Image (cartoon, rainbow, N blue to C red):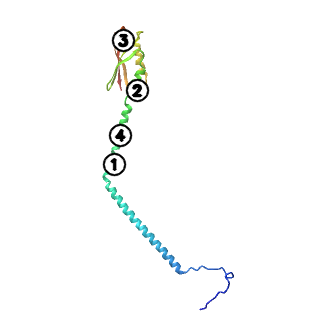
Amino acid sequence: MMIEIDLLAQEVKSKNTKIVFKQEYFLYLLVFLLGCLILAHICLGVLSIVRQVRLRGLENKWEQLAPQRKMVKSFTSGGELSSATSSVVQKLLDQRVSWSKKLNELSSNLPDGVWFNEILLNQTTLIIKGSIISLRKEEMALINTFLDRLKQDQDFSPDFSSFEFSLAERKTIGGYEVINFTLTGTLK
């Protein structure tokens, strides 16, 4: 074996240096990559086991909630009946008569000299008892005007199949002639 001594100055030496990759480094790199692969496999295995345990716990909870789920299911199926009931109720509400509007229309269509003594209502009939006084002796014309106004009023008449004059009776009160009348309306 011969020993070589390089006596050249550093400035003169060639800058060509080769990187030598030794087989030992390759072996270390291979062992390192294999270790990383094994570590990743172990981590994924542990993560899978944790997920399975968690899934079993959730399945057990789901089974414990079975009675409550049945109650909710019966409640929601009852909700369908309830929605059918609500549609029937809504239909009834749409068909109902708004008596506050009807009374307001009665009042607004009332001619001078006519007043109400009594308003009676049962399930199918509206009975209005009132009185008329007229210094010009136009009592019947006033009651006919009132009836015509009610029949033409689109807010009042649609809920009635008929609205008729049914009774008149003359009386003298304090020197004035007063006619007591009765109107009868039949609801649809």
Q: Check disc 4 and give the amino acid type.
A: Ala
Spatial CA distance of label 2 from label 3 is: 28 Å
User: Residue 176, position in %: x, y?
Assistant: 37, 9
Residue position for label 1? 72
Q: Quadrant of residue 80?
A: top left
Residue position for label 3? 178
Residue position for label 4? 84
Q: Check disc 3 and give the amino acid type.
A: Val
Q: Check disc 2 and give the amino acid type.
A: Lys
Say which element carries label 3: strand
The answer to whether the residue labelled 4 contacts the one labelled 1, judged by CB atoms less than 8 Å apart, is no
User: Residue 165, position in %: x, y?
Assistant: 36, 17
Up/down of 149 relative to 34, above or below:
above
Residue drawn at x 37%, y 22% as measured from the top left:
162
Spatial CA distance of label 3 from label 4 is: 54 Å
Does 36 sit left or right of 70 as displayed? right
Residue position for label 2? 101
Label 4 crowding class (10 Å Cα cut-off): few <14, some 14-19, many 20+?
A: few
Does 4 sit left or right of 28 as displayed? right
Q: Check disc 1 and give the amino acid type.
A: Val
Spatial CA distance of label 1 from label 3 is: 69 Å
